[in-house]
C-alpha cells in the first residue's frame, strides 16, 4: 500500500468514529493560529498570535515579514494549542491546514508544517479553503446552524454573496468586481491618517457619528448581486484631496461614518435580497468585516423587516483563526479524500 492509500484507509475509519479531533493550522496572512476542534463545532483551543504590532509601522502587511514571523511562531503555537486543549498529538485524528487563498510565503509556512506533522504522526492531512473556512466559523458560534443558508462573505480579500447548499457545496451569487470591502476600509483609514488595521479604527471613530457626506450616488451593479468598492474608495480619496487642496480641515469621524454607511448599505440590501430570492430565511455573515458594528446593526434591522434571521460569528472568530479551519476540515473529511503530501499552497483559490 502506498502512503496515500494508508491515509485513505485511516480516514475511512476516522469517519466512523463518534469523536473526531482535528488539529488545524492557519497562516494565510498576518495571524499565526493553531486550534484543536472536536466534531467541527467544539473548540478545545484556538491560539491566535497576531502580527498587527509588527506590521503597524509599515502601514500594512509586508508579506516577507509575515512569512518570517510565522516561521518563528508556528512551533510554540502548536505546543500551546495542544497544551490548552489538554491533548497530545496521539489524541489528534487529522491535521488540517489553510491551503489558500492568502499570501504565498505565509501559506507555505502552515502547509509545510502541517505536512511534516501529518507525516511524522501518520495522520491524514486535510486541505482547507480559507474563504469557506470563514463561513464555518458560524458552525462554532451557532451549534444548531445547518445548511442551506445564504452567506455574506466580507473580508480583507473577498466580498461575496454565496448560497451554502450543504457543508461542502457553495453557489456564488455575486461578488465584488474590483476591491474587497475590507480592502476599502483599510485604504480609506490610511488616507484619513488612521493607519493599519483600518477596519476596526473606522468602526470605532464612526460610532455615534451622524454621517452627512454622500460619496457616490449610483450603484454600478444595481440589478445584480455584484458590488464595486473601487468607486466608493476613489470618491473618498478625491474628497479628502479636494478638502486638503482648498485648505479645509478634515472631519475624519464624519468621513469615516459616511464611508462606512455607504459601504455597508451597498452590500447589506443585496445580501437580504439574495436570501429572499433563494427562498432562504437565514443569512450568515463571515470574514473580518463581519465584526463591523454598523454592518451588524444594519443587517439585523433589515433582517427583522424582511423576516430573515441574521447570524454573525463571535467577534474573535470573524477575523483569521484556526478554529474555523478545524471546523470546515471536519465537514470536508466526511466527503473528500485526504490531501497528498505533494499538495502546495494556492495563493488564489476559487470558492
Ligand atoms: O477575514 P480577515 O481577517 O482577513 C482576510 O481573510 O482577508 O479580514 C481582515 C479585514 C481587514 O480589512 C480589516 O480591516 C477588516 O477585516 N476588519 C474590519 C473590522 N474588523 C476587521 N472592518 C470593519 N470593521 C471592523 N470592526
Ligand atoms: Zn480571512
Image (cartoon, helix red, strand yellow):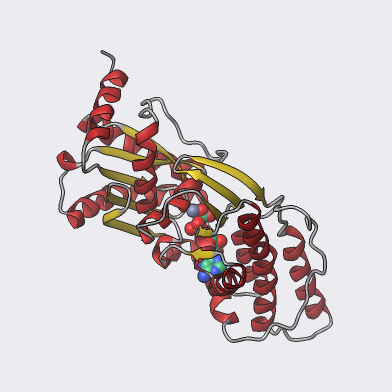
Q: Residue at x 43, y 62 (%)?
A: 313
Image position, residue 130 (x, y; %)? 47, 46
Image position, residue 42 (x, y; %)? 28, 54
- Residue 135 falls left or right of residue 150: left
**Quarter of the picture holding the N terminus:** top left
Res 58 visible: no
Image position, residue 106 (x, y; %)? 45, 45
Q: Residue at x 68, y 68 (%)?
A: 265
- In the figure, residue 296 lies in which quadrant? bottom right
- Residue 11 falls left or right of residue 238: left
Q: Nearer the viewer, residue 151 or 123?
A: 151
Q: Residue at x 39, y 52 (%)?
A: 324
- Which residue occupies the extreme top position in the image? 1
Image position, residue 149 (x, y; %)? 52, 52
- Residue 78 falls left or right of residue 215: left
Q: Nearer the viewer, residue 278 or 220?
A: 278
- In the figure, residue 333 lies in which quadrant? top left
Above or below, comparing residue 202 to residue 108 in the picture: below
Above or below, comparing residue 80 to residue 109 in the picture: below
Amino acid at each position: 500500500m502506498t502512503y496515500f492509500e494508508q491515509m485513505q484507509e485511516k480516514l475511512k475509519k476516522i469517519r466512523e468514529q463518534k469523536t473526531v479531533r482535528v488539529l488545524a493550522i492557519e497562516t494565510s496572512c498576518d495571524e499565526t493560529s493553531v486550534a484543536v476542534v472536536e466534531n467541527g463545532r467544539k473548540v478545545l483551543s484556538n491560539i491566535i498570535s497576531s502580527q498587527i504590532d509588527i506590521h503597524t509601522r509599515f502601514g500594512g502587511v509586508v508579506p516577507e515579514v509575515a512569512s518570517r514571523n510565522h516561521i518563528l511562531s508556528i512551533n510554540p503555537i502548536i505546543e500551546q494549542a495542544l497544551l490548552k486543549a489538554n491533548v497530545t498529538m496521539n489524541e489528534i485524528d487529522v491535521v488540517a491546514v489553510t491551503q489558500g487563498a492568502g499570501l504565498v510565503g505565509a501559506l507555505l509556512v502552515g502547509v509545510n508544517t502541517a505536512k511534516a506533522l501529518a507525516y511524522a504522526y501518520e495522520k491524514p492531512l486535510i486541505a482547507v479553503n480559507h474563504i469557506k473556512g470563514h463561513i464555518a466559523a458560524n458552525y462554532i458560534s451557532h451549534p444548531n446552524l445547518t445548511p442551506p443558508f445564504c452567506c455574506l462573505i466580507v473580508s480583507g480579500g473577498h466580498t461575496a454573496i454565496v448560497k451554502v447548499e450543504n457543508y461542502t457545496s457553495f453557489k456564488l451569487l455575486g461578488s465584488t468586481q474590483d476591491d474587497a470591502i475590507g480592502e476599502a476600509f483599510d485604504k480609506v483609514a490610511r488616507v484619513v491618517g488612521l493607519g493599519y488595521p483600518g477596519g476596526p479604527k473606522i468602526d470605532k471613530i464612526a460610532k455615534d457619528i451622524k454621517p452627512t457626506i454622500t460619496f457616490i450616488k449610483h450603484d454600478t451593479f444595481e440589478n445584480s448581486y455584484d458590488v464595486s468598492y473601487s468607486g466608493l474608495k476613489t470618491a473618498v480619496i478625491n474628497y479628502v484631496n479636494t478638502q486638503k487642496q482648498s485648505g479645509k480641515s478634515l472631519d475624519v469621524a464624519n468621513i469615516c461614518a459616511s464611508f462606512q454607511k455607504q459601504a455597508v448599505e451597498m452590500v447589506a440590501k443585496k445580501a437580504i435580497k439574495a436570501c429572499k430570492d433563494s427562498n432562504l430565511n437565514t443569512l450568515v455573515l463571515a470574514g473580518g468585516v463581519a465584526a463591523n458594528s454598523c454592518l451588524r446593526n444594519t443587517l439585523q434591522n433589515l433582517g427583522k423587516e424582511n423576516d430573515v434571521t441574521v447570524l454573525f460569528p463571535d467577534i474573535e472568530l470573524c477575523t483569521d483563526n484556526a478554529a474555523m479551519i478545524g471546523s470546515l476540515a471536519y465537514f470536508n473529511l466526511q466527503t473528500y479524500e485526504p490531501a497528498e503530501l505533494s499538495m502546495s499552497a494556492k495563493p488564489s483559490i476559487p470558492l
